[in-house]
Image (tube, rainbow, N blue to C red):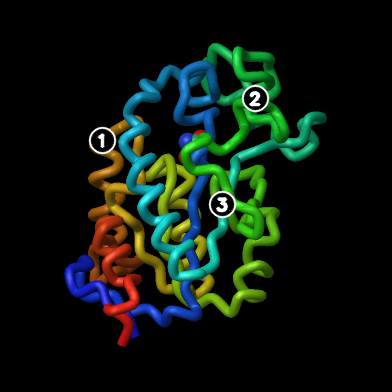
Amino acid sequence: MPEIAGALPFPYRFPRHRTALLVIDMQRDFVEPGGFGEALGNDVSRLQPAIPSVARLLAAFREARMPIIHTREAHRPDLADCPPAKRMRGAAALRIGDLGPMGRILIAGEPGNDIVPALAPLPGETVIDKPGKGAFYATRLQDVLKGFAISHLVIAGVTTEVCVQTTMREANDRGYECLLAEDATESYFPEFKAATLAMVRAQGAIVGWTATSEQVAAALRPDEDG
Ligand code: C5J
């Protein structure tokens, strides 16, 4: 069984045939100017360093022919799945559903809601639209994971302390053994990213493990298989 000896807080072993990559919300709406992230007042350039690291994980999982699941934070055009509390929270320049330079903010099918081109899903990979921060809430994610008989998840994406952490906690509560790829996740707030990584692996991996994308990719190379 592959092992990431340098994972924190202790080595992470994962059965190759029961492990999937879960990439959270690598969407133009969060990563590029003119989307939801910038409308909330954030410096979106802070998320861009995650792109090559997520690409490394995608290449490794594709090469190993292991399941890949992408999520998008997305609402229906009629906003029926967007609670008013979510839409009206804060003083955003543009709210969910408003028309911005990349189309309607956080609405399924709009250009800004797409996954960034460098990380575009390939045919056969699962894409799940989610109305909440956690990827299990009001989605078919659990059924998809059951279909693949998944027990272990490598998690990447943005933002670390919002949709990534919420999803990782949801997954942990459902019994999945989760590892967060340190350099394949970013936050608009570096201190929140650091705190999230620390709290995930504290107390004996109370939420899960962390490791770099290169450590994950190395463990997936055929000569690493045990
Ligand atoms: C946020 C996300 N930050 N994908 N969404 O609203 O983390």
Please name the residue that numbered disc 2 is placed on. 96
Q: Tell me the amino acid under the disc marked 1.
A: Pro
**SS of the residue under disc 1:** helix
**As drawn, 167 above or below 194:** below
Please name the residue that numbered disc 1 is placed on. 190
Please name the residue that numbered disc 3 is placed on. 70
Q: Quadrant of the N terminus?
A: bottom left
Residue at x 61%, y 44% (from the top left corner): 132
Q: Say the numbered circle drawn on residue 36.
A: none
Q: Under 8 Å from ligand 1: the CB of mark 3?
A: no
Residue at x 68%, y 17% (from the top left corner): 98
Q: Quadrant of residue 214?
A: bottom left
Could you give the CA–CA distance between mark 1 and mark 3, rounded to whole angstroms? 23 Å
- Which percent across, then down, holds residue 174? 53, 71
Could you give the CA–CA distance between mark 2 and mark 1, rounded to whole angstroms? 25 Å
Q: Tell me the amino acid under the disc marked 3.
A: His
Is 100 situated left or right of 10 in this image? right
Could you give the CA–CA distance between mark 3 and mark 2, rounded to whole angstroms? 21 Å
- Which percent across, then down, holds residue 171? 50, 65
Q: Earlier in the sequence, mark 2 or mark 1?
A: 2
- Which percent across, then down, holds residue 121? 58, 48
